[in-house]
Amino acid sequence: MKFFIIFLVVWGHVVQQTSNVSCWPVQEDSVMRLIYTMHMPLFMGLCGYFFYFSIQKWSSVHMYVIKKLPSRLAGLIIPMISFGLIKAACDLFRGTPIPHIPITFLKYLFGDIKGIWFLGDVAVNTVIVLLALYFCKGNFRHDWKYFALFALLSIVPYVSYRSPHIYFFFAAGYCLPAYVKSDFRSYIKYWKWGLALFVASYIAFSNMPWPPEDFWYDYHHQSVLQLVVNDGLKMILGVTGSCLALIFLYKLLPYMKETSLYHLAAREGQYTLDIYLIQIIVIEKLLGPFYKQLVSQSGINWVNEYGLIVKVVSTLVLAAILLGIVMGISRLCHKNQYVSKILFWKS
């Protein structure tokens, strides 16, 4: 599942870097929009899901906070700093103007660091859920209000974005193994209802009378009505899209277990954090600017010039190639223990 989602991340970034409008506002690129309706909610939900089992290894939440939390946060924040510095170095190499005033330069550098937003969101959501757990008793009827109350912390300005609906998916991922005891397979029969709801919400989200701007809520530029409609649709798309993706893989995996792709996914799915970080440099800092320069010089955007089918196939193939390159770079980085520690905080 993690490998499947990290491929969607790579594909989404390839589409973003080759799009005519760089996908902002997001509704301008239908492929990018479709990918983003599910892959980040599902990825954040998986982080919450595995976080539950991480806490279970300790005798209490308090013991987890004392013994494990510092290393978990270091494993998220240090890679943000390392790759933020690499992003700045890439800008310098490409000739991007770098501020010379120390304070301005530090703000510029911090912008590159906080731009690796997903790791920051995981760190913040980890702390928020742990705070809620101090008041929980293991009964969802009692505990849900504390998860909801502490959701208010997710709108406090922090690493990069302010997005309560991303916190929702992290908390939901945690709550699934903690409170839901029924078999996942009992819900598969409702997939048609989920698909219908997803399609209807996707059409509505794509045809609103105002632009959603991006997939994070923006109270500075949107009215209360816009926020409610935008983020309500995002929640529905995230939940239904995640469920449909889970059902799809559940049905597909039995036919793949003996294939080389299955074994590749099982192996490389352990390194999704590394892949996520490396692909930022490869796709956003190297490929994206290079492709935009080619388009600027030739006046032709080859990926978008020949219709939707060519766009989907070409970006899909390019994403697969780039994922292979990124995995190769990841393996090279882990051959040296010092490089692995500095970049990914792993031995």
Image (tube, rainbow, N blue to C red):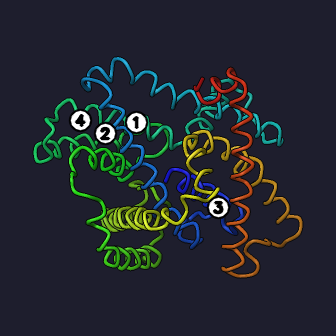
Give the amino acid type for the residue marked by disc 4 in the picture.
Ala
In three-dimensional space, the C-alpha distance between marks 3 and 1, rounded to whole angstroms, equals 26 Å
Do residues under tags 3 and 4 come within 8 Å of each other at their CB atoms?
Answer: no
Location of residue 239 by image quarter: bottom left
Counting other residues with Cα less than 10 Å from the Cα at mark 2, is it few (<14), some (14-19), or many (20 or more)? some
In three-dimensional space, the C-alpha distance between marks 3 and 2, rounded to whole angstroms, equals 30 Å
Q: Which of pointers 2 and 4 lies earlier in the amino acid sequence? A: 4
Residue drawn at point x = 41 percent, y = 62 percent? 246
In three-dimensional space, the C-alpha distance between marks 1 and 2, rounded to whole angstroms, equals 9 Å
Give the amino acid type for the residue marked by disc 3 in the picture.
Gln
Counting other residues with Cα less than 10 Å from the Cα at mark 3, is it few (<14), some (14-19), or many (20 or more)? many
Element type at marker 1? helix
| Residue that carries the numbered disc 2 in the rendered image | 153
| Residue that carries the numbered disc 1 in the rendered image | 124
Q: Which of pointers 3 and 2 lies earlier in the amino acid sequence? A: 3
Please state if 247 lies on the left or on the right of 327 as rendered: left
| Residue that carries the numbered disc 3 in the rendered image | 16
Q: Position of residue 232 (x, y in %)?
A: 32, 65
Element type at marker 2? helix
| Residue that carries the numbered disc 4 in the rendered image | 132
